[in-house]
Amino acid sequence: MSNPPTTKTERRQRPRAFRLEGDETVPPKPAHGSGAELIEAEMDAFARETAELVDGFTGDETAIEAAQAKGLLQSIVLSWGGVFLTALSGLFSLALSVWAWNFVEDLFKHSAILGGVGLAFAGAAALAACVFIFREIRSIMRQNQIARLHVALAQAHAANDQKAARARVADLGRLYSERPESARARALVKEYAGQIMDGRDLIDLAERHLVAPLDEIARREIAAAAKRVSVVTAISPRAILDVIFVAGQAIVLMRRIADIYGGRPGLFGFFKLARSVGSHLAITGALAVGDTLLQQVLGHGLASRLSAKLGEGVLNGLLTARVGLSAMAVCRPTPFIAEKAPGVGDVAPFLFSGKDKANK
């Protein structure tokens, strides 16, 4: 049985007035000696979550943009390393050109036929070098275009800028204009872009129809690469073969994912892509597979019940999947807004199926 009220304040609770200042509620100061406790209003959790989505993105999006800035969007020519490589490449090209010129002159001294053949080979080599340089420049520019489009769409969505959203969605449609399978989606997005539509909704629509089908293809590629790596590592007799195969699969996977999203890199473009992927892995954690799946596998799951070799296959498969997810994040032309960013458990659930069965 509760004690009856003893003081006059406790016996009689009077209505209280509040003063409004804009959107804030200012409670009155308690009377001197009243001993009354004030309950401060807390912000609604759902309202806080909505504000975060409106004002900006999560830390994952920040990590993606930071990785793109360190790799794809970083200028090579304007850095000291770029100046060194440019000067060294120029000296090497000049030395090679002088040597080829002198060699062709010596061939002409011996025979006009040999000189003509040598000149034809030198011309073919020079033409191939020009085509190679042109393709490298074009691939790097296309990668930078996709990375800048990613950042611009994120900013337009955060600001709910309808004009910027229309312009960037149009750029996204032109990016895939050469793909016949995206014609219907591009027509649908173009139709909605001409209507009175919210900027965020337009970007969400473009992501669902233009980028989400590519996400599914990228997931299948990641799953296939992780499965190959886990199987080959489990049956490989030598550790050096494991390293070579895992590295080769990672290179092929990064190039394949970049090609899926429209930015297949060349030789130097791949170095920029690899730097972005490495930066993303360093920021987010190379083995941060989410939901403590890796800790469960290593602690009391699959790896502790099977052989060490099969456990190495699982870990190499996890690492390959993580590399693929990082490449997917930095190569994607839109941020993950309408679609949820996949995890290792989403693209390679077979790596944890044995653990799930063992726990049942």
Image (cartoon, grey):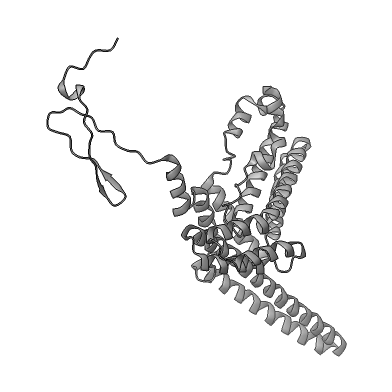
Quadrant position of residue 124: bottom right
**Residue appearing at x 73%, y 47% in the figure:** 220
Question: In the displayed structure, would residue 98 be above or below residue 212?
Answer: below
Out of 344 and 25, give the one closest to the viewer.
25
Q: Measuring from the top left, give residue 209's x and y in whole percent.
A: 67, 57
**Residue appearing at x 65%, y 63% in the figure:** 189
Quadrant position of residue 114: bottom right
Extreme residue in the right direction: 113
Residue 53 can be seen in this image: yes
Extreme residue in the top direction: 1
Quarter of the image with the C terminus is top right
Q: Measuring from the top left, give residue 352's x and y in whole percent.
A: 68, 33
283 sits left or right of 134 in the view: left
Tally of numbered discs: 0
359 sits left or right of 110 in the view: left
**Residue appearing at x 60%, y 26% in the figure:** 299
Quarter of the image with the N terminus is top left
2 sits left or right of 47 in the view: left
Q: Measuring from the top left, give residue 225's x and y in whole percent.
A: 73, 46
Out of 174 and 347, give the one closest to the viewer.
174
Quadrant position of residue 350: top right
Question: In the displayed structure, would residue 359 be above or below residue 108?
Answer: above
Question: In the displayed structure, would residue 91 be above or below residue 36?
Answer: below
**Residue appearing at x 70%, y 54% in the figure:** 213
Q: Measuring from the top left, give residue 115's x and y in whole percent.
A: 82, 86
Out of 69 and 14, give the one closest to the viewer.
14
Residue 332 can be seen in this image: no
